[in-house]
Image (cartoon, coloured by chain):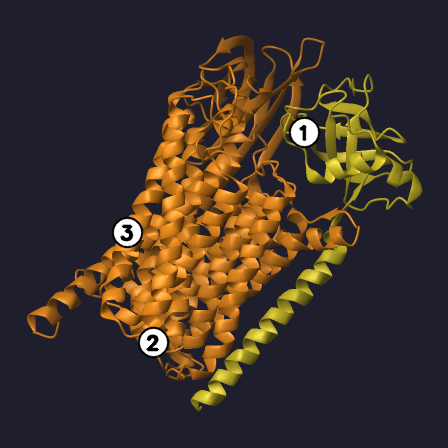
Chain colours: A yellow, B orange
Amino acid sequence: MKAKHQRLALAMLAVAAVIGAAVLALSALQDQAAFFYAPSDVKRDEIPVGRAVRLGGMVEKGSVVRQKDGVTVHFVVTDGKAEVPVRFTGVTPDLFREGSGVVAEGRFEPDGGFVADNLLAKHDERYMPPQMAGTMHKTGTLKQ
Amino acid sequence: MIAEAGLAALWLAGALALLQLVLTILALAQDRPELRAAIRPVAVVQGLLTALAMLALILVFARSDMSVLLVAENSHSMKPFLYKVAGAWGNHEGSMLLWVTILGIAGAAVAWFERRLDERTLIATLGAQAAIALGFFAFLLIASNPFARLDPPAAEGRGLNPLLQDPGLAFHPPTLYVGYVGLSVAFSFAVGALITRNVGPAFARAVRPWILGAWIFLTLGITAGSYWAYYELGWGGWWFWDPVENASLMPWLAATALLHSVSVLATRDGLRAWTVMLAVVAFSMSMIGTFLVRSGVLTSVHSFAVDPARGTFILVLLALYIGGALALFGARIGTVRAGNTFDPVSREAGLVVNNLLLSVILGIVLIGTLYPLVAQAFGVKLSVGKPFFDETVGPIALVLMAALAAGPLLRWRRDRLSALRDRMTVPIAVALLSVAGIAVFARGAGVLPTLGLGLAAGLAVASVAPLWRRALRRTPLFTYGMVLAHLGVAVSVAGMAAESAFTQEQLVAVHVGQPVDVGPFVVRLSGVRPTVGDNWSAIEGVLRVSPQDGGPDFTLRPQQRFFSAPPTVTSEAAIKTTLGGQLYTVLGEADGTGRRQLRLWWKPFVTLIWLGGGMIAAGGALSLIGRVRRERKAARREEEMGWA
């Protein structure tokens, strides 16, 4: 094979690889990208039951109820306009508190409740996930 | 005074970077030897001055000088000394200063040590290095001055984020930064070689040690970061595909590809354009990583809340450097003479396959990491996480492992497929036997983990095969390095596959004395008690653990720690490492009825993940030593022959 031809073949291979990567990534993104919702978005939009999503807001004061098995906790996430009941089985993160911010990863059930596989709590007083800050800002519950 | 001295040093260093850039342009345009001679000393002094500035910052942190804004915001006088020092880079401004410092020192090292490259290319390289440094000096001095004063001084500092108070994390960022910045040197070499049209084996041999060095530190940094997240965050995972993790993985993928393609260029004078392109891409990835982490645009446990102006600044630098380099690449690449050709079945072709697969993985990770940002620009909020990356990267990584096994068994330039088949017979047999064995004896391990374990076994055999029937004492050190690094990949993948296939988990609320079975252990909570440390107090669970095979009992003490500055709670997992794996325990909340939550994991062979990472880095170090030695020897021989 001549040098010029080999160069061309390699370049085409590289382009094919990049396009392949992009196609693979974008098709997987269709199924796997978790969408982010605030409680009031949930009321407005159609609830995608069973799809992996994130739900962000504040843990409503007085709503945290620990269940009899000792490892399941029920609470309500609110953004001031709407509430969503959440169920989570596991050790709650260190900064999980009533009245404090939380992002729950999980899925909606047909009855409108939310089952969380994972909770992300606010990190420290200076840290807030930008996604959460954005949602708060939109619904006007962020108090500085 | 110390703060002002540091700031002055920083301004001077910035001015020298500007001088270095101007001198380079003049020296390249006009053939004046006195200008060329001035550039090296300027680079060295610039490096010294940035080091001085960093030293000044460490000093004000060590002395808890609360009249410096950065110290007041990120430190506390009661903190252990190590974390006072580490606090100097545990924040936005300090970490950017560390970036510039390593950049300056690396530039000085190139100016001081690099003797093999021809002078014009070296000067162009130092000019490119100065241009990069200049942007970051501007960023520090204009947008994030680390030495800003606070008037009146604070009485006490706000403290360092307790999650960062860990010896592992104190040294983690510097390690990663050495890797990032090492890639900037590779980038500068590539730009230098493009400017003087000197892309060839000599360029490849000069740049290779720098790539190797950067790659070793990136490997160490990623391995250490993974272990830190594993034991410190208390969720028992070793890789989360967090944007910040991806930010270090992407340059590593590019650097790994570059490391292999630069070998083709140095040994066989092939893949010229591709290698230069990869050098540009690798540094672009470390810039994108810096942008993602430092701009605060992504949700991550690591991102310090940063104002958007800084993100914009880094984005502009990013566009300037990458755009500039790509433009130069486009303009000059036509003049780069085509290298040697090779057969479709050859070591070169194997390395091309390796490069393509690494590039595909890099592309997927990049898309997955940036997609949420793009979607957000269109008003859609979403996050891309572990399921996406596992599903896309996992299968390609398995194919890459097969290529990794075959590549070193191929001859340079031309080989026969039947010969490769003969050499691969044993590794393939081992892989198939392992898959069959797991399918029979450990059902339900899952398809991907089973394939992973089988491939790891085959790869382990294939990676030591290049040593087969060789005179071991005359085998060069870098061959041993390659063998060790490839074996490390097999070990690491075996650990990942075993962890995801065989982990057992118990999440329970228990009374004192109640037994819980997990893996080969019985765990009993024998009490909960308070304890204190340097700047924290804690609730500690005392866990009595009995191995079911009748070995001696031992005690684990997972804690919930309370820090007062800033007020934070952290979980400290307690981990027992045995030959077979790790028992990982986390203490949860009390449930109000006298029970305590416990989260227990038995993770068989999980330690292999990081052992493999260490082996990969050690393999890189062996190669580096081997290469540098051979270069020295070659240089000495030339001197003796009277050529130099």
Q: Write the residue at 66% across / 24% down.
A: A95
> In which quadrant will I find the C terminus of chain B?
bottom left
Report helix, strand or loop for mark 3. Answer: helix
Q: Tell me the crowding category of disc 1: few under 14, some 14 to 19, or many 20 or more residues within 10 angstroms, Cα based.
A: many
Q: Tell me the crowding category of disc 2: few under 14, some 14 to 19, or many 20 or more residues within 10 angstroms, Cα based.
A: many
- Of the residues under marks 2 and 3, which one precedes in the sequence? 3
Task: Indicate left or right for B575 with A110 as reference.
Answer: left
Report helix, strand or loop for mark 2. Answer: loop
Asked if residue A129 is positioned above or below residue B108 in the image, the reply reads above
| Residue nearer the viewer, B284 or B493 | B284
Q: Position of residue B398 (x, y in %)?
A: 53, 60
Disc 3: which residue: B44
The quarter holding residue A67 reads top right
Marks 1 and 2, how far apart at CA: 52 Å
Closer to us: mark 2 or mark 3? 3
Kind of residue at badge 2: Gly
Residue extending farthest bottom: A2
Closer to us: mark 3 or mark 1? 3
Marks 2 and 3, how far apart at CA: 27 Å
Disc 2: which residue: B200
Disc 1: which residue: A122
Kind of residue at badge 3: Val
Kind of residue at badge 1: Lys
Q: Write the residue at 75% across / 53% down.
A: B377
